[in-house]
């Protein structure tokens, strides 16, 4: 029997912000920003194809990068 777990949206988690949480959010936000070039390179370096098998399309790479940026700006930065 499969049990379904209730998902809690990240916004609700971040709404429960104490001083410790703010410090943690700041650390995560800072580390992501400091390493954004490395993150972009990591995603860009994933091959689009290997041995005639599609690995990751350029559209998907762009989606992942945009998603990361949106999450940083709209979720993490909001709580600093």
Image: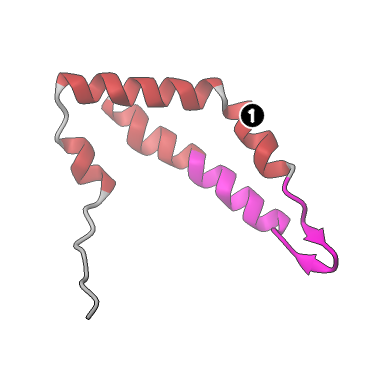
Residue for badge 1: 38
From this view, report whether residue 3 is shown above or below residue 35.
below
Which stretch appears magenta?
A: 46-68
**Horizontal arrangement in the rendering, residue 65 relative to residue 6 (left or right):** right
Rendered location of residue 18, percent (x, y): 14, 24
**Horizontal arrangement in the rendering, residue 24 relative to residue 36 (left or right):** left
Location of the N terminus (image quadrant): bottom left
Rendered location of residue 3, percent (x, y): 20, 72
- Viewer-closest of 69 and 36: 36
Residue lying at the far right of the rendered structure = 51
- Viewer-closest of 32 and 63: 32
Magenta stretch: residue 55 in it? Answer: yes
Give residue 45's quadrant in the image.
Answer: top right
Query: Tag 1's secondary structure?
Result: helix
Give residue 78's quadrant in the image.
Answer: top left
Q: Tag 1: Cα neighbours inside 10 Å, few (<14), some, or many (≥20)?
A: few
Give residue 15's quadrant in the image.
Answer: top left
Residue lying at the far front of the rendered structure = 1
Q: Residue at x 22, y 70 (%)?
A: 4
Location of the C terminus (image quadrant): top left
Magenta stretch: residue 45 in it? Answer: no
């Amino acid at each position: 029997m499969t049990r379904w777990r209730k998902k809690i949206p990240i916004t609700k988690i971040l709404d429960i912000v104490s001083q410790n949480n703010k410090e943690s959010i700041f650390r995560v936000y800072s580390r992501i920003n400091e390493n954004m070039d490395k993150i972009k390179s990591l995603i860009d370096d994933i091959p689009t194809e290997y041995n005639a098998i599609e690995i990751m399309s350029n559209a998907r790479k762009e989606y992942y990068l945009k998603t990361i940026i949106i999450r940083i700006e709209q979720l993490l930065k909001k709580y600093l």
